Image (cartoon, rainbow, N blue to C red):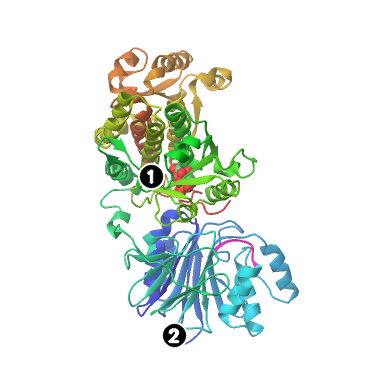
Amino acid sequence: MCGIVGYAGSRQAGPILLDGLARLEYRGYDSAGVAVLSPGGGLCVKKTKGRLSALNELTDSGRALDGVIGVGHTRWATHGEPNDVNSHPHVGENGRIAVVHNGIIENYAEIKKFLRQKGLTFQSDTDTEVVAQLLEYYLSGGEDLISAVYKVLHRIEGAYALGILCADTPDSFVAARKDAPLIIGYGGNCNFIASDVTAIIKYTHEVSYMDDGEVAVVTKDSVEVYDALRRRVEKPRHTVDWDVSDAEKGGYEHFMFKEIMEQPEALRATIYPRVKDGRVVFEELKIGEEYIRKLKKIYIAACGSSYHVGMIGKYNLERLTRIPTETVLASELRYSDPLIDKDTLVIVISQSGETLDSMAALREAKSRGARILSIVNVVGSSIARESDDVVYTHAGPEIAVATTKAYSTQLAVLNMLGVYFAGLLGKMEPEQYDEIVAELRLLPEKAARVLADTERIKYLASRCFNHESVFYIGRNLDYALGLEGSLKLKEISYIHSEAYAAGELKHGTISLIEPGTLVVALCTYLPLFDKAMSNVVEVISRGASVVALTAEGRAGELSGTVEPENILTVPETHPVLEPSLGIIPLQLFAYYIALQRGCDIDKPRNLAKSVTVE
Ligand code: F6R
């Protein structure tokens, strides 16, 4: 979703802004623009609909823009169609102010009406333009820039990360944040703002995370931050522990494929530090045994793939801990008057840590007295900072829009939390505990074995890519796994696909199975293997073409029913961990199908990596 980058230094700003925007492309966008403070005074603004290549062409990759201070933006349209005029930066009527914005100004219509009554005219259909116009309105009333910014922030409602250039203050730009991500980067003799670290990691590893209500004044030599009451704030600085190469393709054709291949390493980095002397440990957790003993209920709230991790969590946490566990879509939780109170632990799962729906669910749960434990990948993100406890996944930066390694590491953490809680509560037999812990440690190696078999999956994909509709079926953990497999396929290949609890098929959906319908049958959850087999027989007898996934030792039992070359296998592990391996062939299956169909795999249409609007 929209990306922002800002630079104040002594080098030409244009190429740095364009480079930063290129690194934010993965967030999803439909237009882009930059504004630079010209040395002779005034603003130079260039913006255009479409990919960054168009903006590069318009600005000679930024070299045509003269100036050392500027802001850039990639827009993901919410208010007003993607076109040149609606692209950011937006400029006030007198051309003194340029604004880039991520988020939504909810009361923009009312402000627009007010400003129109004052005689101002609007160029775009966006909510953002009111910020630029309102700023100029206050400036023309005699306010200085910072006072005008505070007045605007008091007046607007909604979510925003803002980058503001003003022709009257040629040595600085201003940034402000509420409910949308924005970081400050310190580059020695230059300073930055950005929506996330990837945009500026090439220039600095030293960052601060802006908090809600804060305003920053950024020059080449200094960054001054003020809180909502305009008091000076000293921001703690953090060092980012990954490098620019982590956010590059490293010889792979797509980030998604690279990230699929990185899963053994990501699992190792996430699991190994949390297993000590055969026990699962979470040294970062502040909650102790006493709290866990008193727990009445667990809620898991998340969106998309993170929600699918939560679906597996529901089965496994309940199974292991015997604590009632409910998994809810974050976007639904906030409006469902949930039965959450101080005895409920709410687990929020989010790769980006910035998903607005998940953040809203977190706040709703907090307001009801719940304790929040989040599982987050991006260090210092908003969800992490508003949680009582954070467990970071160590997946590294995930650039492809479709999540893969973040999903796998979230799942590992959630399963480990189940084992950890169950261990504290004495709910597991020692042998069962030891077996799961041993299998957890083996996951990276077993994941690597699955990845060694990509050719087979590629071949299968070459036979399936022409289907226009696919069903994923499975029971229990395989059902939850199917939800993610199906999402992977539909989001990157644009094939319609649905996941069904296999036992539910006969209650309606089986009417859609006809000769040739592609069904991906998941039979990895071995306690229900026989039941899954009967569903396979059920769809085959209605003419379905079946691709089956099972554990290595069970392929023989399927081969009489399913064509042997349509059977994929994963190594056997403890049943509760099976989706951690099962997901890998499904990611690859989706990837190769999308490849065959010529899709834009890393940046599927209409999607954004980080969804910071409701
Ligand atoms: C799908 C995908 C999305 C995200 C969802 C939540 O591949 O990536 O469904 O899982 O938008 O995002 P986070 O985890 O950042 O909160």
Q: Please give the range of residues in magenta.
A: 156-162
The numbered disc on residue 327 is none
Instruction: Say which of 123 and 149 sits in front.
Output: 149
Q: Overall secondary structure of the magenta stretch? A: strand
| Residue 465 percent across, percent down from the top left | 40, 33
Side of 117 where 366 appears, left or right: left
Please provide percent x and percent y for residue 155: 66, 69
Q: Is residue 83 visible?
A: yes
Q: Amino acid at mark 1?
A: Ala
Count how many numbered circles sit on residues in the image.
Answer: 2
Q: Position of residue 29 (x, y in %)?
A: 48, 56
Identify the residue under disc 1: 406
The three-letter code of the residue at mark 2 reads: Pro
Q: Residue at x 30, y 46 (%)?
A: 258
56 w.r.t. 473: above or below:
below
**Which residue is disc 2 drawn over?**
39
> In this orientation, which residue lies closer to the viewer: 241 or 56?
241
Among numbered discs 2 and 1, the one appearing first in the sequence: 2
Find out if the beta carbon at label 1 lies less than 8 Å from the nearest ligand 1 atom.
yes
Q: Nearer the viewer, residue 190 or 92?
A: 190
